[in-house]
Image: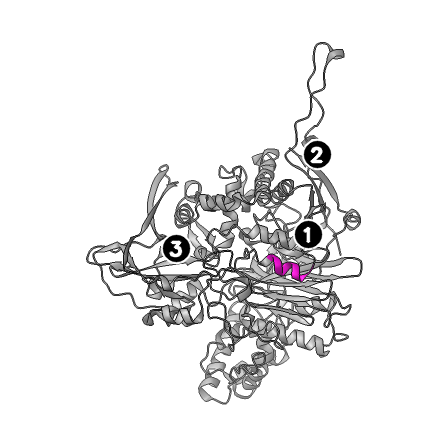
């Protein structure tokens, strides 16, 4: 594997001198002056692919090194996100520009109003006040970023923000806000437009709610199918070649914004030694490993918010009735400075709140503010200041039980945790921020007319006129209103656990998790194609039918299983499609028939016909009555399967979908049997880099989402895709870890680490992560920097 040399980051002149500077006219009587105490002292070693290994004696200095390193590689991304969480995008970039919050595109102005009203500094600062070590880490991170800004002239910043006036020093409050933005991405952050557009009705306004358009609502919000995902597998002693734990972490996150992962190795001697990856702006490892345990996360199915239907006082839309008492809505007014061609102007907007959270306006769901009713959002991750402490506890864990104990801090926001340890144990835990609303309470408290919104759109609406319908306080929960860890799904095994974003039900099919409350997840429900592909792949490996040697997992077989690019939809339906095409497709479809018949049912770069299948299945999967064998809860991995080619209506629709697919490819100049790698990839530095993988709907484990078919094929990664991929195992003497960061460490196109790992990903190659000091020192690209101030 080739290794790119990381250039020296600092000259000796950047190190702060510790020698005395004072001199007198009589040197023989001069007294040496003591050096000022250093607040921060950190060593940063860089190894191949720009991975920083950061070591410090305290958490403040560790944060300093982490902030400095991240700013070196991603200054513009970070500065842009700080603009967002400060509510200052319109001031510098204008009101109409767009950003992304909660994985949703929103205008700069809406984003500013949201962050100036919903994300309050006071509660965040209060939440961290009693966590001095965490506060030191956050403060150090801001100081490290600011050190980089002082050391680097604006004309040397990356092109995206070179010389920009909106790149400014960070404060510890900024880092708190960055964490809160991450915490609420699956809740209030996904509802920015709904929050800032909620307005009281005008006099004489209609009392009738608009007719819901749930198809439009689901296209926009996707609450039942969040756009973020992951694969997480953990194997125990029964399933691995050496009897120790083994882990696959494969989060599917954006290749853009600070939701890109960043690789780091963080060490405080005597406290922890942890390596892995963190989301941008996070000063601690989110997905990673230490010498004894490895973990990953997958987005879980729990609902992170509910809505309360408020009964308004007649004639007063700013007051509501609860338990027979009149209560007044709270107002928070944002004054936003807006850049315009004619100079700055001020925009004022009011957002309305109950003590539980902001009001929302969701016309596509039929939920608007009328003279009779309004809807307020309660967020399970509001003011979640427990996240960093939870991941710090992960960093020091000695086994999966240590990870399980860390989860009791209730800081994990919206993900499952999957872990494996050197003792050969595997853990699945959906212990995350989840409203404490039981199935019985939800049934009793959902207004009957609004009950269909939950199964159809993932919206849980409760009666806001009765405190009996509030989230219940569990004495075992650290946070009022949240479900306690002891009442959430947990499974420890010595064979395996796995999750690909369905509920806990089939974390291990031999031990199904049942009895889940609806707000936690479904059981006996159709599983996603990717979940099914994963469970099939694991079963084939463990019964020795996947074509690889043996019947257990090790790192090579784990990597091969992920990157062989098996396609679940192809396995289940392509043979029927090809047979139908050949028998009833007519002469004009025979080239397509031949391509489908010859396709290897994978989405590898060598797979011919995979693009044709993608365009076909994108259309065909929505055909009514399309499956020959429908879903069977008794066989959830293998159903549905087959195409209902015996039905004439379905048959005609399938052939029509195939004609459309073939026509689309022809129009785009893509041969029907083109190798997928020739038409699928990204351009970096003027070079086309082919990529493996496929989109969610096809059921490919290595999920990579591309922009729609264009001339020449699929030319850019969009949405959420394989990002940081780690495979971690344990040996008698330590830990073995190989990983790849699919887009590289740096978002700066001038950096050598802008796309170096993208090229590795293209070749299905991995970085052997140096973890011990001898391994780090053996890296030929190693550089060392000492920073202090």
The image quadrant where one finds the N terminus is: bottom right
Q: Which residue is mark 2?
A: 11
Distance between mark 1 and mark 3 Cα atoms: 37 Å
Q: Position of residue 427 (x, y in %)?
A: 64, 66
- Compared with 40, 319 (above or below) is below
Distance between mark 2 and mark 3 Cα atoms: 52 Å
Residue at 50%, 47% in the rendered image: 127
504 left or right of 731?
Answer: left
Q: Position of residue 571 (x, y in %)?
A: 61, 79
Q: Earlier in the sequence, mark 1 or mark 3?
A: 1
Residue extending farthest front: 475
Magenta residue span: 399-406
- Compared with 778, 636 (above or below) is below
Q: Secondary structure at mark 1?
A: strand
Distance between mark 2 and mark 1 Cα atoms: 28 Å
Q: Position of residue 409 (x, y in %)?
A: 56, 55
315 left or right of 700?
Answer: left
Nearer to me, 316 or 86: 316
């Amino acid at each position: 594997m080739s290794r790119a040399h990381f250039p020296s980051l600092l000259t000796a002149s950047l190190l702060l001198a510790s020698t005395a500077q004072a001199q007198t006219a009589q040197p023989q009587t001069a007294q040496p002056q003591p050096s000022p105490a250093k607040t921060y002292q950190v060593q940063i070693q860089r190894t191949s692919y720009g991975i920083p290994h950061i070591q410090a004696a305290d958490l403040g200095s560790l944060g300093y090194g982490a902030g400095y390193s991240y700013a070196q590689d991603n200054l513009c991304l970070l500065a842009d996100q700080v603009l967002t969480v400060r509510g200052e995008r319109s001031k510098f970039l204008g009101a109409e520009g767009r950003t992304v919050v909660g994985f949703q595109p929103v205008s700069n102005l809406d984003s500013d109003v949201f962050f100036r009203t919903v994300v309050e500094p006071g509660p965040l600062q209060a939440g961290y006040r009693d966590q001095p070590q965490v506060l030191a880490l956050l403060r150090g991170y801001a100081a490290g970023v600011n050190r980089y800004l002082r050391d680097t002239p604006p004309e040397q910043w990356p092109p995206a923000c070179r010389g920009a006036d909106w790149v400014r020093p960070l404060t510890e409050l900024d880092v708190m806000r960055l964490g809160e933005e991450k915490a609420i991405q699956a809740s209030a952050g996904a509802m920015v437009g709904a929050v800032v557009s909620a307005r009281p009705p005008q006099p004489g306004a209609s009392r009738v709610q608009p007719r819901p358009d749930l198809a439009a609502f689901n296209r926009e919000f996707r609450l039942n199918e969040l756009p973020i995902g992951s694969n997480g597998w953990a194997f125990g002693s029964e399933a691995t070649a050496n009897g120790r734990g083994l882990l696959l972490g494969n989060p599917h996150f954006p290749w853009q914004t600070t939701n890109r992962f960043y690789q780091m190795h963080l060490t405080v001697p005597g406290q922890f030694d942890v390596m892995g990856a963190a989301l941008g702006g996070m000063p601690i490892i989110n997905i990673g490993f230490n010498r004894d345990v490895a973990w990953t996360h997958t987005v879980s199915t729990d609902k992170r918010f509910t809505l309360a239907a408020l009964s308004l006082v007649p004639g007063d839309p700013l007051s509501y009735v609860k338990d027979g008492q009149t209560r007044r809505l709270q107002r928070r007014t944002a004054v936003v400075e807006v850049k315009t061609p004619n100079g700055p102007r001020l925009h004022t907007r009011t957002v309305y709140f109950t003590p539980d959270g902001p009001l929302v306006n969701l016309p596509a769901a039929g939920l608007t503010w009328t003279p009779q009713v309004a809807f307020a959002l309660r967020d399970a991750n509001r003011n979640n200041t427990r996240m960093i402490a939870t991941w710090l506890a992960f960093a020091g864990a000695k086994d999966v039980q240590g990870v399980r104990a860390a989860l009791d801090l209730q800081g994990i926001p919206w993900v499952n945790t999957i872990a494996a340890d050197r003792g050969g144990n595997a853990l699945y835990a959906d212990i995350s921020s989840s409203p404490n609303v039981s199935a019985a309470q939800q049934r009793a408290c959902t207004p009957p007319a609004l009950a269909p919104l939950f199964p159809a759109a993932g919206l849980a609406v409760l009666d806001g006129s009765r405190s009996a319908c509030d989230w219940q306080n569990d004495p075992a929960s650290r946070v009022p209103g949240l479900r306690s860890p002891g009442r959430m799904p947990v499974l420890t095994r010595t064979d395996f656990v796995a999750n690909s974003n369905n509920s806990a039900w089939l974390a291990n099919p031999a031990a199904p998790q049942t009895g889940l409350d609806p707000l936690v997840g479904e059981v006996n429900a159709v599983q996603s194609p990717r979940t099914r592909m994963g469970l099939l792949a694991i079963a084939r490996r463990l019964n020795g039918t996947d074509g690889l040697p043996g019947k257990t997992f090790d790192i090579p077989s784990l990597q091969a299983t992920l990157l062989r690019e098996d396609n679940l939809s192809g396995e289940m339906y392509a043979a029927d499609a090809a047979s139908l095409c050949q028998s009833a497709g007519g002469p004009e479809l025979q080239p397509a028939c031949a391509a489908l018949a010859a396709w290897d049912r994978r989405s590898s770069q060598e797979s011919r016909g995979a693009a044709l299948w993608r365009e076909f299945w994108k259309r065909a999967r929505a055909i009514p009555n399309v499956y020959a064998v429908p879903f069977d809860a008794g066989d959830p991995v293998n159903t549905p399967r087959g195409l209902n080619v015996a039905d004439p209506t379905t048959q005609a629709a399938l052939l029509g979908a195939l004609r459309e697919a073939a026509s689309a490819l022809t129009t785009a100049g893509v041969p029907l049997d083109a190798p997928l790698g020739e038409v699928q990839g990204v351009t970096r530095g003027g070079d086309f880099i082919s990529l493996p993988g496929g989109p969610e709907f096809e059921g490919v484990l290595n999920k990579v989402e591309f922009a729609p078919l264009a001339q020449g094929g699929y030319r850019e990664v969009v949405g959420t895709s394989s990002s940081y991929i780690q495979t971690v195992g344990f040996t008698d003497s330590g830990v073995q870890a190989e990983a790849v960061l699919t887009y590289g460490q740096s978002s700066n196109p001038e950096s050598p680490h802008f796309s170096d790992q993208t090229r590795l990903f293209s070749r299905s190659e991995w970085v052997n992560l140096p973890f011990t000091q001898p391994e780090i020192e053996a890296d030929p690209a190693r550089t060392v920097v000492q920073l202090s101030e």
